[in-house]
Image (cartoon, coloured by chain):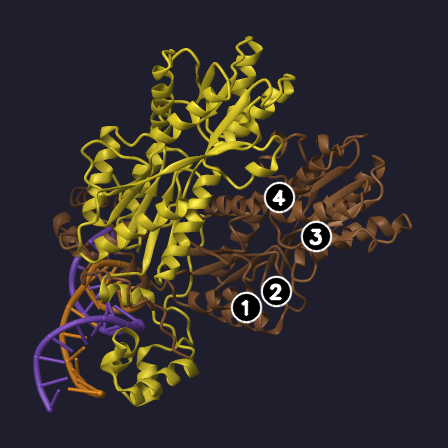
Chain colours: A brown, B yellow, C purple, D orange
DNA sequence: CTGTTAGCGCGTTCAT
DNA sequence: ATGAACGCGCTAACAG
């Protein structure tokens, strides 16, 4: 297997600039201009506390005058770091992952790190490939977030090997016997509470709208749903509705199909907010009113929920906390410390019109 | 002004790994194992046609066995390229920019390029700072997309200087006398057609919901709106509604305020889809029906539009075309060719429930 | 507090 | 078709 990482497409033109930018100032130029050695310039950038204020000022002036910017390649080569972290997400078509990327970026930027972005588009083989090529792409660490199942042997192997190459933290799920740090929501409890809420407002029976086969999140949320139903002596399998995809269209199609078959529940717990909105629209198209006929609760508490009609209830969880924890684990690993193995972020239900007492 | 790009926060732990990964194989190891010189290994990676098939195979086998991955830092240092492009967007809170990022990533990945992501969050000073630090962050080129005004002297200067440091393409707007290549939508025509459509369905008067002061896009779309109104002898200023922000909440608040003041139009052209949805909800909260009382058209044709109630009409424009053109310009510049100065992508209206003949 | 110096891993001549 | 050797710009020892 060839290990070429670069420009596989012969059509792709390659950058001509063999040496960086012709007129660009380098550290030697700055040192010269400031009348100091390159080491001092380097210190001003990396360990300013070791340089006298007067010297530091001279150097900084020289840097400004020459429009100097450190060369990341040289810096990374010598120092072994890049001040760059990779984020790998399941799919940017899902708003929650976008929220996560935003939160992570803020956190990373705050610490002076740049962000490399990868989008798997729910393709597992793409995960393995991405992990493989991430090896030396120039990022110091990787934050992976996906709700898709990660526990098949090939993926676990890829993840384990990746872990030996760079700090890796997985946001969103926990794999048995996994060796990497994990941050995730308490999805099971969140789903149980949401289901209990639906039962409380009399929205029976409650259907669970979410695919399970290849979704870790779906399975986890279904487990919480099942907890609530079993406590009431109901069969959780009876109103388990399969879903083909995780977007608006999938939610719409699934509900459309069930309702057309005259299967009409009192409430729907959707695996995410997009599916919930799709479901809501499908119900509307069948003259079913939300929440009077059918209540709906989604997952994620995405920003559009208050503005759709009816506004959608959803299970909230702080994405900032996830981001902070994930970055915290990364900083720990950078520092050679052992990160906390698992961090669980609590969820809570946000009630809106779609699940009011009807 | 100090030019430090790295870890400003003293609290941030720094990566310990002085040399990359301890056990990582490098090009020397591969050469040794394959019984060739490092030059040959390099050729296998970069100019495989110059290596005999037999040798190539031996080298590739060695690379696989050693789990070798080229070191981007060293490669970039020597070769002056990174196979990385930076994307800078106005705000990831707006779905259109997310769509753009997705499309760009696909295009870049297809050509073997990684993606660095920056989010300005509509902060102009942040743009200047970002551009500044992008200088040598390790990306070969920059694609900037924002609808915020770029034509103040400081920004233009920052952009012009950036352009001397790396290939830069601006997606979304054109600045007079600008020296950088631009790809953008034909927003003015799109807005005119949307307004004409609203007039056709009898949704008069038509209000324009969009801030102009700091938004290039707002101004452009207003111009198209004004074109249509002026052709009918209407005053475009009369129903120009200011907007504080560009999200759901801003659209909601603006319409809420106008309606509370008993200013009720027959139609609303919103500067984007989020604003349109916020507006739609505000109308609903005032017992105004869409489209029977008020029609709405947005901009962007975001994916949730068909699933809200009523579904929202919107001005569509191919984000893939924008992405392709932007990348095309980047490849041109990489190859030393002059890119096309301006590329305009056509728009067209997608009619949905919110602007049906009422 | 500051200067000197040795590589980091790779791509590229220029040899052969 | 292949190899030897140089140096890209920077950081981190170490020396002073």
Dot 3: chain letter: A
Q: Position of residue B92 (x, y in %)?
A: 46, 41
From the image, tell me which residue sits under label 4: A274
Confirm whether circles 2 and 1 share one chain. yes
Foreground tag (3 vs 1): 3
Q: Is residue D1 left or right of residue A178?
A: left
Query: Label 1 vs label 4: CA separation?
Result: 29 Å
Dot 3: element: loop
Dot 2: chain letter: A
From the image, tell me which residue sits under label 1: A159
Q: Nearer the viewer, residue B114 or B169?
A: B169
From the image, tell me which residue sits under label 3: A210
Q: Nearer the viewer, residue B9 or B61?
A: B61
Q: Residue at x 37, y 20 (%)?
A: B228
Look at the numbered discs 2 and 1 and tell me whether their residues touch, using CB distance below 8 Å.
yes
Foreground tag (2 vs 1): 2
Q: Is residue B314 above or below residue B343?
A: above
User: Can residue A60 be seen by looking at this rendering?
Assistant: no
Query: Label 4 vs label 3: CA separation?
Result: 11 Å
Residue A3: which quarter of the image? Answer: bottom left
């Amino acid at each position: 297997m060839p290990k070429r990482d670069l420009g596989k497409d012969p059509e792709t033109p390659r950058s001509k600039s063999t040496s960086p930018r012709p007129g660009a100032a380098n550290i030697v130029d700055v040192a010269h201009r400031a009348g100091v050695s390159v080491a001092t310039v380097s210190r001003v950038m990396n360990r300013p506390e070791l340089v006298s204020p007067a010297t530091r000022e001279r150097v900084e002036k020289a840097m400004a005058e020459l429009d100097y910017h450190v060369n990341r390649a040289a810096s990374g080569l010598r120092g072994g770091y890049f001040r760059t972290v990779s984020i790998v997400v399941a799919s940017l078509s899902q708003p929650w992952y976008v929220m996560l990327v935003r939160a992570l970026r803020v956190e990373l930027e705050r610490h002076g790190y740049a962000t490399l972005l990868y989008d798997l588009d729910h393709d597992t083989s793409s995960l393995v490939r991405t992990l493989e090529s991430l090896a030396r792409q120039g990022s110091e660490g990787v934050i992976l977030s996906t709700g898709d199942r990660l526990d098949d042997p090939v993926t676990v192997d890829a993840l384990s090997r990746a872990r030996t190459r760079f700090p890796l933290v997985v946001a969103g799920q926990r794999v048995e016997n996994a060796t990497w740090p994990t941050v995730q929501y308490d999805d099971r409890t969140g789903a149980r509470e949401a289901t209990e809420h639906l039962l409380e407002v009399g929205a029976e029976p409650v259907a669970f709208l979410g695919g399970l086969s290849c979704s870790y999140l779906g399975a986890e949320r279904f487990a919480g749903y099942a907890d609530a139903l079993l406590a009431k002596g109901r069969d959780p399998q009876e109103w388990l509705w399969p879903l083909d995809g995780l977007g608006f269209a999938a939610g719409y199609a699934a509900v459309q199909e069930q309702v057309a078959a005259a299967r009409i529940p009192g409430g729907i717990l959707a695996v995410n907010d997009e599916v919930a909105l799709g479901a809501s629209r499908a119900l509307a198209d069948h003259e079913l009113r939300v929440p009077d006929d059918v209540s709906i609760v989604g997952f994620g508490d995405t920003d559009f929920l208050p503005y759709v009609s009816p506004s959608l209830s959803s299970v909230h969880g702080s994405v900032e906390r996830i981001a902070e924890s994930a970055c915290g684990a990364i900083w720990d690993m950078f520092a050679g410390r052992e990160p906390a193995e698992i961090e669980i972020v609590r969820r809570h239900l946000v009630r809106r019109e779609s699940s009011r007492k009807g």
